[in-house]
Amino acid sequence: MIYGMYLSAQGADSNSVRLDVLSNNMANANTTSFKRDVPVFRMNPPFEKKQGPLNGLPGDLENHTGGISLESIRTNFENGSFISTEGDLDLALKGQGFFQVGSRDKSFLTRNGSLAIDADRRLVTADQNLPIRSKDGNDIAIPLEAVSVEVSPDGVVTPIDGNGLPLGSVGQLAVVMPSSLEELVKIGNSLYVTEGQVAPVKEGVNIQQGFLEASGTNSIEEMMELVTASRMFESNVNMIKLQDESLGRLLQSMPRR
């Protein structure tokens, strides 16, 4: 009886984690370049089997599971669809890679290419006002006389004056990749940090100007999973209550000395 309560408790705990992850995915269904998280669970062997009892497992516990527990929460980095904005400062990365933003001392990675020009005429992220880095690690400054900006597929930034004439390149956007996507840690606002090294993406860089990458969350699929996880959580909680009541009735029926 107690064994069953432990299994149900593990099921409830696992589905509670699943609900948290799915809820966060749902909340970011409209967040530019958001990457959905996926909880990964492992099935455990029975406790007695794991400990290796000398005389074998009692009853049919050999055929039972030891419940499930959280293995990890992984991020699905599959590319999202592109949304056309026709904005000069809206950029989307086609294929792998990340923009590098922040300072030399504290940099972040992001696929959110929604940019703006700050008071110092630097290209910065529109949401956090973080400078976007060039391939040489410097800020990218836009001249005061520029009325628009052109960004080539390989990231070369060229300001355009009021007569439609280019003012010359002011830098090339840094597009980098970490040594492993597993090293990336989400810190919110579509930003990532990594303790490992990052390297420039040498081939296949394709920056689409006038587009933004949509969230990787599918609202309908996420809602269906959310409902399923909610029902599974409720079922496990009800099983705990049922087994607790059954155990209570059993103890009450035992003769007292």
Image (cartoon, helix red, strand yellow):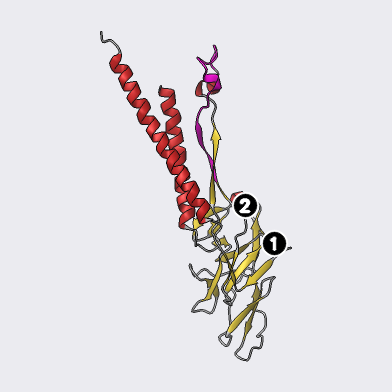
The x, y position of residue 243, in whole percent, is 37, 26
Going by the image, does 35 lie left or right of 247?
right
Name the kind of residue labelled 1 in the image: Val
Image quadrant occupied by the N terminus? top left
Q: Secondary structure at mark 1?
A: loop
Going by the image, does 147 lie left or right of 119?
right
Name the kind of residue labelled 2 in the image: Leu
Residue 11 shows in the view: yes
The x, y position of residue 230, in whole percent, is 43, 43
Residue at the (58%, 76%) spot, across then down: 86
**Disc number placed over residue 212 in the picture, else none:** none
Q: Which residues are magenta?
A: 53-73
Going by the image, does 34 lie left or right of 93?
left
Residue at the (50%, 30%) spot, across then down: 67
Per the image, the residue denoted by label 2 is: 181
Crowding around mark 2 (Cα neighbors within 10 Å: few <14, some 14 to 19, many 20+) is few
Residue 104 shows in the view: no
Q: Determine if the magenta segment contains residue 62.
A: yes
Going by the image, does 65 lie left or right of 253?
right
**Disc number placed over residue 201 in the picture, else none:** 1
Q: Secondary structure at mark 2?
A: helix
